[in-house]
Amino acid sequence: MTLAARITRTPFAFDPTAASHLRASLPDLGPEVMELVSATAGCSPYLRGLMEREAGWMPEAVADPEAALAAVLAAPEAAALDALPDALRQAKRRVALLVALCDLGGVWPLEQVTGALTTLADRAVHLALTRLVADEIRRGRLPGATPDAVPTAGGMVALAMGKMGAGELNYSSDIDLICLFDETLYPGEEHEARASFIKVVRRMTAILSDVTDGYVFRTDLRLRPDASVTPVCLSMAAAEAYYEAEGRTWERAAYIKARPCGGDLAAGERFLKALTPFVWRKHLDFVAIQDAHDMRLRIRDHRGLHGPITVEGHNMKLGAGGIREIEFFTQTRQLIAGGRDPDLRDRTTVGGLAALAAKGWVPPDVAKELTQLYRAHREVEHRLQMVNDAQTHSLPTTPEGVARIAAFCGQTEAEFRRDLLDRLHRTDRLTEGFFSPADIEEGPELSETAREITRRWESYPALRTDRAQAIFRRLRPRFLKGLARAANPDEALAALDGFLARLPAGVQLFALFEANPTLIDLIIDIAGSAPGLAQYLARNASVLDGVIGGSFWDTWPGVAGLRAELARRLALASDYEARLDAARRWMKEWHFRVGVHHLRGLIDGFEAGKQYADLAEAVVASIWDEVVADFARKHGAMPGRGAVVLGMGSMGAARLNAGSDLDLIVIYDAQGAEGSDGPRPLATRPYFARLTQALVTALTAQMPEGRLYEVDMRLRPSGRAGPVATSLQSFTTYQETEAWTWEHLALTRARVLAGEPALADEVEDFRRALLRRKGQGAAVRADVAKMRARLAAAKPAQGPWDAKNGPGRIMDIELAAQTVALIAGSPARSVERQIAAGKGIGLPESDAQALLSAYRLLWRLHAAARLLSDRTLDWDSLGEGARAFVLRETGAQDGAALARQLAAAVTAAAAAVEHVVGETGDGLG
């Protein structure tokens, strides 16, 4: 389609005489185009000169702008090295003219305008690199290289940074490049290769930047690592080592937009992938906000850009309310959360804002407004540069100069001034609050105890740096005001003190609090109610990322949803060990979520128990898949039908508390196979034994992010004396002929968590059939009675508040429920359903209700107690917040009422258990 058919706007001719002279010097291009080009010439001496020089080419350009652009970009491909500079300069003149007309006429949107300029820059860099490397190879200066290496520039790559990397070059942009080479291609000859590549870069820079009848692109190489002391081309290994050891936040932000643009593009992509952990941190990184704010202030100080927003002389890029504010706003948020969410890693400013809005990091209306402001700012910036092809971002300092830019934008001077100031102020309003740290508030009056506690804070590890202290000084009054509202302020302060004392470092966390004040309320709530959870939080502060970086307050996703999300998280990790560590971070975030929801009353103890179990099941199933895959790479696939992982005890019953470990069994069916078939094959028994041990290690090993769970495998056949993995045949034979009654009781709660589905079905079918057969006869009750007596002796109640151990308490009720299920041959796993199965074997309704009522009270008490602490509940030592939580959970009016309720329930439940099993096995029947 022609240019004329798509023109939607034109400038005003600021200099009518210049416009008239151009009309006379050009062929007739049609009325619409002539109006556009003459008005353009009346605003821009530079573009008037280009149109006069390229008058013979303009009919082709306006007939089909896209086809003309493609032809211009292709033309330099045929140029030899000595003719390349002139060919590229001609391409630059024509692209500059075509882009200007399409921009000024509203034919192309901003992205197409900047994209055309960037495509030319990419083409110029790649052609210059490959031609120059070919020359080095021809001269024998690049060790070992042959002409086959020319298309990839001998392993050298130019990384486009900044606006070029994002495809956002402005009209008169310079281009920022970092030039690297793959040193692995030159073993033992790296220094010779580097010397050759340094010459290539210098010659490339001259081709692009030297002004000889125009220029191609001013080229800036100063974004490379430690530019003041390093050569213009570095090895990738040296660059990577620098970023790992010394990389700064501004360099991380720069790499958001980095893109290979010339030379060995595949090597460039590999380098950027290796740099991912540097650019995209695994935790939410709110320190980037302060770093960006400091950078903004340094830029303004250096350029003298402080002061009120005015039109004359205002810097559209770096000044208040300018382009850089929107870019920093976007990139800083990307740095904060992009490590956890790859969807946020968009190179472009507009694309980054859209991604942040889609993921809830920026309100959609703010993202939309900033996008509109960004596009408008860029258009003004382009017109500033189009006047004389100057790399400027500042508005003219005279009214006459401002009037020229207004005309170039198609507005009167008054309209331009009004609209520009409005846009600058709107940008400043939307972005400034995000960056500027809050003023320090006045704190409340403190008691002597509180003053004594707070005096210790500056000696803590988390506050050992000046930066941490500066942020915490702004946070301190907010913490203290919040604590003042607690039921017992000094008690809550002591808990907060314990939290701060255990923090190994503070800058990241304090920056997180400052950017998200609601987290302060959450910390105060936890400190005032659950000191045990506060201690957990101090050891695992990164779990707070989940509160703001995801769906922390959403509906529980269930096992399937958890597995899907964990799979997404693991897919981002580079290797097996990294995936295990990623699983630990992920599990702790969700584990913390369950605890917070429980503490705040969003769920009760039973819902928390199910959610802890869902989480554990998702982790075990996902880790099993990772372990199996890693083991298979070394030793081959599992022989036969493979294996399944059974959850036993509370895990099998799908009810865990905040501190539960996992009881697991692994059962395999090799189907007669003698061993595996892999790089290092193993015989069947050692294969599954070592695979099981690998699973246990994957779950329990202490890694940088801690461990997942403690694992107990003593419920396998023959306990500690038996093999860690059991064959299906051995398992079924043992259960049929050798297992004790307590092992059959344990099987009432067994549940397959992971593994081969058909084998899982077979194990479940066997479990159900076995329970129907093994629950018959008086021996069952006699065995249970003896077991109960041994448990009572080995694990007596640790006081009246012990919900778990002792007659009539959780373990005693669970024993009775399992006994009922075994006698009834019921496959039920939960206490409630097992007790309900007692109707078929004569369990009196009064006993069933006594057991259920006590169990409900005891579980709520136990779940609450384990969230508060890993020790047995001691009412007298609980703080006021913790007591309120326990009373809310149990529905009791006060501690005395709860103690009476608990004693009565335990007495009734103990009597009911006696009725089920009797003292010598003479119970039900």
Image (cartoon, rainbow, N blue to C red):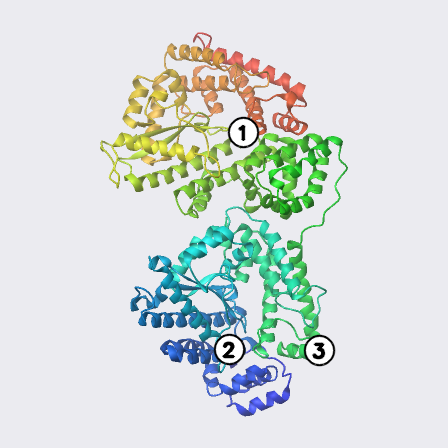
> Which one is in front, 460 or 42?
460
**Residue 496 percent location from the top left of the image:** 65, 34
Q: CA distance from mark 2 to mark 1?
A: 68 Å
> Which one is in front, 329 or 897?
329
Which residue position is annotated with label 3? 399
Q: CA distance from mark 2 to mark 3?
A: 27 Å
> In the displayed structure, does residue 520 sit left or right of residue 273?
right
* Label 2–label 1 contact, CB within 8 A: no
Q: Which mark is residue 762?
A: none
Q: Decide: is 411 above or below 195.
A: below
Q: Which mark is residue 606?
A: 1
Callout 3 amino acid: Pro
Which residue position is annotated with label 2? 96
Earlier residue among tags 3 and 1: 3
**Marks 3, 1: nearer the viewer:** 3
Q: Quadrant of residue 690?
A: top left
**Residue 145 percent location from the top left of the image:** 31, 65
Callout 1 amino acid: Phe
